[in-house]
Image (cartoon, rainbow, N blue to C red):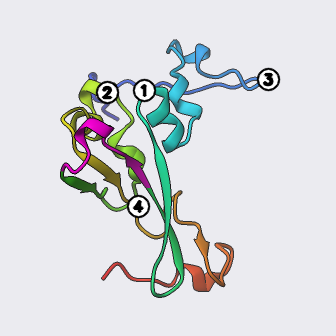
Amino acid sequence: MKFCPSCVLCHEVGDSSGNTVEDCGRRHLPEVDLQAKEIIEYHGYTAEEHDVTTVDGYIIRLHRIPVSIENAGNTAVLLLHGLAASSTSFITNEPKQCLAFLLADRGYDVWLGNVRGNLFCQQHRSLTSEDPKFWRFRFV
């Protein structure tokens, strides 16, 4: 069996009190335990959440980093992640390395979209996420 020498796997070992990060020798990042709106606010930006109901009843949460009053009227930008991701894809790094924050810093009205079935789209007008019908949708 061959292993890639440049790949290092760090297995988190937990104890009864839930301590795992220190066991792995990594520092704990506060954002790890935060939701998208909280991450945005943690980095000093204003954050909003907007729920949008689709024609077929899915409720999708959008996150917004609005422009400041002095930049009101500037262009809006919608960032939409790839499959199997969420709006947090654009805010999970340092602000100077995150597209959402970089755009906000340049005066854009930033909207972060989500797709059906991810963490921010687990609601429906009449179905629960435990109902198999909830998961019968298409991305077309």
Q: Where is residue 119 in the image (x, y as percent from the top left)?
A: 53, 57
> Badge 3 is on which residue?
17
Image position of 62 with respect to 12: above or below: below
Q: What residue type is labelled 1?
A: His
Q: Indicate which disc residue 43 carries.
A: 1
Decide which of 121, 40 is in the foreground and name it.
Answer: 40
Q: Distance between the residues labelled 3 and 4?
A: 34 Å
> Badge 2 is on which residue?
95
Q: What residue type is labelled 4?
A: Asn
Closer to the chain start, of discs 3 and 4, is: 3
Decide which of 99, 69 is in the foreground and name it.
Answer: 69
Which stretch did the figure color magenta?
63-74
How crowded is the residue under tag 2: few (<14 C-alpha within 10 Å), some, or many (20+)? Answer: some
Q: Indicate which disc residue 9 carries.
A: none
Q: What residue type is labelled 2?
A: Pro
Task: Check whether the beta carbons of the residues at disc 1 and disc 2 lie within 8 A of each other.
Answer: yes
Task: Check whether the beta carbons of the residues at disc 3 and disc 4 lie within 8 A of each other.
Answer: no
Query: Which quarter of the rendering shows the C terminus?
Result: bottom left
Q: Position of residue 66 (x, y in %)?
A: 35, 45
Disc nearest the viewer among 2 and 3? 2
Q: Distance between the residues labelled 4 and 1?
A: 21 Å
How crowded is the residue under tag 3: few (<14 C-alpha within 10 Å), some, or many (20+)? Answer: few
Q: Give the image quarter of residue 88.
A: top left
> Badge 4 is on which residue?
114
Q: Give the image quarter of residue 19.
A: top right
Q: Position of residue 91 (x, y in %)?
A: 37, 38
Q: Distance between the residues labelled 1 and 2?
A: 7 Å
Image position of 122 with respect to 21: above or below: below
Q: At x 22% / y 44%, what residue is drawn?
A: 108
